[in-house]
Image (tube, rainbow, N blue to C red):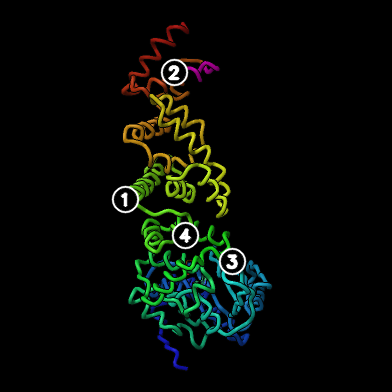
Amino acid sequence: SKVKTVNYLERLKRFFPKDVLDLLKDIGQFSEKLGYKSFIIGGVVRDIVLGKQSLDIDIIVEGSAIDLIKRYAKENNLTYHVYPEFMTGNIVFPNGLKLDFATARKEEYDSPGSYPKVEKATLFEDLYRRDFTINTLAIEITYSNFGKLIDYFNGLVDIKEKRIRILHTLSFVEDPIRILRALRFAGRLEFKLEKKTESLLKHAVEKDLLNFAPTGRINLELNLTFKEEKVLDILKLMDKYKVLYKLFGITLDKEKEKLLVKLQDNFLILKEILNTDFPTSSNYLYVLLSNYPQEIVYNLLKKYHFEKEAKYIDEFLSAFKIVKESQNKYTLYRILKSFNKEFLPALMSFLDSNKFKGIIDVLKKEKNPLIKGEDLIELGLKPSPEFKTILEDIFVKYLNDQFKNKEEAVSYIKNKYLKEVK
Ligand code: ATP
């Protein structure tokens, strides 16, 4: 009854595009007709308060989410999915927006860190099982209370004061994955751990609680971490709080930090040249674990279910070895052609600037060769299997800087290949 509420109607109007706001109103109206209360909650509300863009909308229904989804979707002829055993589901709208719904529920943990069982509950109970106060805010969308922000746990103050705070003393014991989530949010939002939360987190790490968390959930959490924009800050926090040590037996020294900075640069540089995104987990993990012998890296990756990353560690290390030994750009080119480019960002973090520039040069030239098949035809050569040899010949000379520009390559072709044809 002492719950804090704030009128957020104006904020909602400013935050959501009009079509989304109208949708939420419509759902709120529908919900009221069914006798249910509905709220947007969690990450999106946190982001509304922070003024951070987000359309990841989670709706909690006091009543039945499944019933609401089915009736609303049928009445409006929309695509929907329901998962009755979890009391969750979603509706997909023609504009591509997807809204996630869940019945307000509580979760029973059988043992620390295990997957919970669910049962119906009130909004308060639903929010009480959540990780941090910053994620406990709700905004009602039910017609008669549309825009009412509900703050049971002082989340609003914690967001304003940039604090990550757990809801109760046993939070990290109940679910040690929250240790990782706390640091991920702290790094992402540039928040600090509130004092008591910090000491409980330290204690939980000390007590080795991460070892009680299912390794599959650690895998999920790490994958999310490596996708964060502020991944380096998060890793520094994971180092500071000994989480990297507990998970992998590693610490972040200056040397490794430098490698990680290079890795981040490499993602950008390579994306610019090759126009593709690179997988983040494998590249970060190969750099983080680079002090270990191969077998230990392999076992650690397997332990946390990085199957693909474990599978390619061998290829990564042999590629690295040959790249280091390669003597000229042509060999680099051959090597680059023969192995998986996915872990190039990590590999390049370990190279001296000569080799690094060599690879960049090879990739750029490969993307933009001086001479293409169409140029040969234009020069009067008839398409034939020999084209491949000619193009390769030109490309190798281009790689080795024998041609400065297209004209030089053309005159070489005229001299060598056109005369022979005649
Ligand atoms: P984002 O999507 O921006 O990373 P989010 O807050 O939406 O952040 P999710 O991982 O999608 O994060 O989780 C949705 C909500 O579920 C969170 O706001 C949080 O309240 C709750 N939650 C997720 N994981 C846990 C957990 N391990 N313990 C307690 N609550 C959790």
Q: Position of residue 376 (x, y in %)?
A: 45, 19
* SS at badge 1: helix
Q: Which mark is residue 332?
A: none
Q: Marks 1 and 2: CB-CB under 8 Å?
A: no
In the figure, 153 relative to 335: above or below? below
Q: Which mark is residue 92?
A: 3
Q: CA distance from mark 2 to mark 4?
A: 53 Å
User: Which of pointers 2 and 4 lies earlier in the amino acid sequence?
Assistant: 4
Mark 2 vs mark 3: give the one in front: 2
Q: Residues within 10 Å of mark 2 (few under 14, many from 20)?
A: few
- Say how many tags the image has: 4
Residue at 43% across, 17% down:
379
* SS at badge 4: helix
Residue type at numbered disc 2: Asp
In the figure, 369 relative to 298: above or below? above
User: Which of pointers 2 and 3 lies earlier in the amino acid sequence?
Assistant: 3
Q: Position of residue 304 (x, y in %)?
A: 55, 55
* SS at badge 2: helix
Residue at 46% across, 66% down:
205
In the figure, 397 relative to 296: above or below? above
Residue at 51% across, 76% down:
130
Q: Position of residue 178 (x, y in %)?
A: 49, 69
Residue type at numbered disc 4: Lys
* SS at badge 3: strand
Q: Which mark is residue 254?
A: 1
Q: Which mark is residue 393?
A: 2
Residue type at numbered disc 3: Val
Front-lying residue, 216 or 251: 251
Residue range in magenta is: 383-389
Instruction: Confirm if mark 3 falls within 8 A of ligand 1.
Output: no
